[in-house]
């Protein structure tokens, strides 16, 4: 039995060709502006010599901040890590809207004088807090009838995107330098900050578009956990990058944990259900008595159904 | 690859031919040229390309500016790399445009010994575009060649075409441009002194003399590879009118800063830039300090992009 999700840190440190197959974990990177999220993964693949790596929650080239890269067998956590809440620092320009909802696009109408006060703006922000409907930007990677929305939009075709429900946990004004404002957005995965900026502009009646975006948090990882690519590359050079590797199980550390005894462990490892308690709901991580991540479980009726088993 | 300056002087035999402008030698062009070459060689025939310069649009309509995706020399180089045996670069003229289709096809048959003609479905040649595919098939029966219509190449459901690539360049979308071209977009020209302001800032740049014919990416800052002779440097390239400075030149300026440059003087040398990605739009800065700070950020991002995009096994995508 080989547990790639051991949180004991045994896989850190020494890394010859064989050992690299065992490396599993998370690198949290502060992505700079100008690189695609995929570029960051390529730098990490090259630096670590580990091909099996992938990022969660794509950050646009123009955006910076927290990018979570899963390495080795930890890539199997991708769907769960991607679905986690995000937090952004968004710079919005009031007074003009663009077709892409950001500074890359073409301005729709001449810029208008911003006649909104800081107080009015702060109050308006609260209308966007909670469960809200949001339509993705026409220039987005969302697929419409099998094609990327931005491919259609670029060809000048009408893009009819369905609105979706997203959750804005909080939306606070950080800086008022009208016509540019900086807001802190804490939201569910899948929220388009460009759409939020555009919708705010529409509600103000003067238009607005996103001019800067920095992700300050992804799931449980914040900028404090993030390493700059410059430092990471230096660590690749000196062979000390493993100091930045976070055990994979940490990615789900704030999830409810179900501790498995030997009997339950055997069941879960074989994909069988185990009983749930009254009030259990949603997803949980199953951990062994040693604290290792065994599986992701989901409540179904009054039982936990293994959704993904990591230890077999 | 043999190169001929016109049809008139040609005397070839046993050839399989394709005709077109082939500006940029993009993915669609590459497919037809590769397939033609392989098929011709399999039949013991020579693969021949009949291309035109200037672009017919320039001759029939009006002179174009910032239009060409490749220089004639660059085009020849790309075509040669695909294994083509002979490239004929026929000067396009109003007289040629008015040649009746039948006469032109006769010229191809007699001068080139054309056995097979490969063209796109919407292809037509000769006066009033009378030589469309059905007409060519008829001529073929008489002059003993066959016509092989070729399907267009698609990427993301879009037909790969030179005009599509020009539009992508206009957006500064170099990643997508490279996918349609099958290689990064490149510009080459002589290095000129420029205004020398970069050097004053501690960021020496090479300005490229390009004229007004080659298509330019949208103004902005780009990550590029710069090739001088047989050496290559990463570089950060600015295309634009340098809005920070007062004495703006009228035409767009292409200037590049070579990272870690350790070669000699490059003025007067031919420098090629391969465009990898766009870092940002052109910006107006309140002062030199702000500009410098941004240039240093651009350089740092440029280094990382080049590190990420270097070739290697890590390019493979994982399931």
Image (cartoon, rainbow, N blue to C red):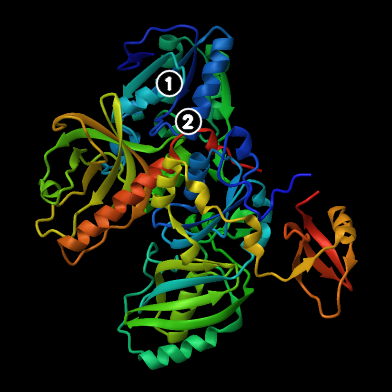
Q: Tell me the number on the disc at residue A197.
A: none
Q: Which residue is mark 2?
A: B29
Q: Secondary structure at mark 2?
A: helix
- In this rendering, is residue A244 above or below B205? below
Label 2 marks a residue whose chain is B
Mark 1 → mark 2, Cα distance in angstroms: 12 Å
Q: Quadrant of the N terminus of chain B?
A: top left
Q: Say few, some or many: other residues with alpha carbon within 10 Å of mark 1 (under 14 / 14 to 19 / 20 or more).
A: few
Q: Say few, some or many: other residues with alpha carbon within 10 Å of mark 2 (under 14 / 14 to 19 / 20 or more).
A: many
Q: Position of residue B11 (x, y in %)?
A: 38, 7
Q: Earlier in the sequence, mark 1 or mark 2?
A: 2
The answer to whether residue B291 is left or right of residue B8 is left
Do discs 1 and 2 belong to a common subunit?
A: yes
Q: Which residue is mark 1?
A: B81
Q: Quadrant of the C terminus of chain B?
A: top right
Whether residue A73 appears in this view of the structure is yes
The answer to whether residue B171 is left or right of residue A148 is left
Do labels 1 and 2 touch, CB within 8 Å? no
Q: Position of residue B7 (x, y in %)?
A: 35, 16
Q: Position of residue B138 (x, y in %)?
A: 56, 21
Label 1 marks a residue whose chain is B
Label total for image: 2
Which residue is at a point 54% across and 11% down the rendered structure image? B41
Q: Position of residue B100 (x, y in %)?
A: 40, 25
Which residue is at a point 61% across and 55% down the rendered structure image? A247
């Amino acid at each position: 039995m080989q547990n790639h999700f051991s949180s004991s840190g045994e896989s850190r440190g020494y890394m010859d060709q064989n050992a690299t197959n065992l490396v599993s974990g998370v690198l949290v990177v502060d992505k700079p502006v100008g690189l695609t999220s995929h570029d960051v993964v390529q730098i990490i693949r090259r630096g670590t010599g580990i091909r099996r790596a992938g990022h969660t929650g794509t950050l646009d080239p123009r955006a910076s901040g927290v990018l979570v890269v899963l390495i080795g067998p930890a890539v199997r956590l991708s769907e769960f890590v991607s679905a986690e809440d995000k937090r952004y620092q968004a710079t919005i320009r009031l007074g003009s809207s663009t077709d892409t909802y950001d500074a890359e696009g073409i301005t729709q109408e001449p810029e208008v004088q911003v006649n909104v006060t800081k107080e009015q703006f702060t109050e308006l922000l609260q209308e966007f807090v909670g469960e809200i409907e949001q339509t993705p930007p026409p220039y987005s990677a969302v697929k419409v009838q099998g094609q990327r929305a931005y491919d259609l939009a670029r060809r000048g075709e009408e893009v009819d995107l369905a609105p979706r429900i997203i959750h804005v946990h909080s939306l606070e004004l950080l800086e008022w330098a009208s016509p540019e404002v900086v807001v802190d957005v804490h939201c569910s995965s899948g929220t388009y900050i460009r759409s939020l900026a555009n919708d705010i502009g529409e509600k103000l009646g003067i238009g607005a578009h996103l001019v800067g975006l920095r992700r300050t948090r992804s799931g449980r990882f914040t900028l404090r956990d993030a390493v700059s690519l410059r430092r990471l590359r230096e660590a690749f050079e000196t062979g000390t990058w493993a100091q930045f590797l976070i055990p994979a199980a940490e990615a789900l550390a704030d999830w409810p944990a179900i501790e498995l005894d030997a009997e339950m462990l055997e069941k879960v490892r074989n994909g069988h259900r185990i009983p749930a308690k009254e009030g259990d709901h949603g997803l949980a991580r199953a951990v062994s008595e040693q604290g290792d991540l065994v599986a992701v479980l989901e409540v179904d009726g009054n039982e936990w159904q293994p959704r993904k088993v990591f230890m077999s | 690859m043999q190169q001929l300056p016109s049809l008139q002087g040609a005397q070839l035999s046993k050839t399989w031919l394709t005709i077109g402008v082939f500006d940029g030698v993009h993915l669609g062009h590459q497919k037809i040229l590769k397939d033609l070459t392989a098929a011709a060689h399999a039949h013991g025939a020579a693969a021949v390309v009949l291309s035109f310069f200037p672009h017919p649009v320039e001759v029939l309509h009006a002179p174009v500016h910032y239009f060409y995706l490749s220089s004639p020399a660059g085009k020849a180089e790309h075509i040669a790399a695909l294994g083509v045996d002979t490239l004929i670069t026929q000067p396009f003229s109003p007289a040629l445009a008015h040649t009746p289709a039948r006469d032109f096809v006769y010229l191809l048959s007699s001068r080139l010994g054309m056995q097979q003609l490969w063209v796109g479905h919407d292809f037509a040649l000769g006066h009033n575009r009378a030589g469309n595919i059905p007409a060519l098939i008829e001529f073929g029966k008489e002059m003993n060649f066959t016509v092989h219509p070729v399907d267009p190449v698609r990427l993301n459901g879009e037909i790969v075409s030179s005009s599509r690539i020009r539009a992508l360049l206009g957006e500064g979308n170099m990643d997508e441009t490279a996918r349609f071209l099958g290689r990064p977009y490149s510009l080459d020209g002589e290095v000129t002194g420029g205004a020398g302001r970069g050097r004053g800032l501690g960021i020496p740049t090479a300005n490229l003399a390009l004229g007004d014919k080659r298509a330019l990416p949208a103004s902005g800052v780009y990550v590029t590879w710069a090739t001088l002779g047989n050496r290559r440097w990463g570089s950060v390239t600015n295309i634009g009118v340098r809005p920070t400075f007062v004495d703006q030149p009228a035409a767009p300026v292409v200037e590049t800063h070579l990272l870690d440059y350790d070669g000699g003087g490059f003025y007067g040398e031919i420098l090629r830039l391969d465009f990898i990605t766009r870092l940002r739009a052109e910006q107006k800065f309140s002062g030199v300090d702000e500009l410098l700070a941004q240039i240093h950020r651009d350089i740092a991002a440029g280094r990382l992009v080049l590190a990420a995009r270097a070739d290697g096994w890590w390019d493979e995508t994982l399931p």
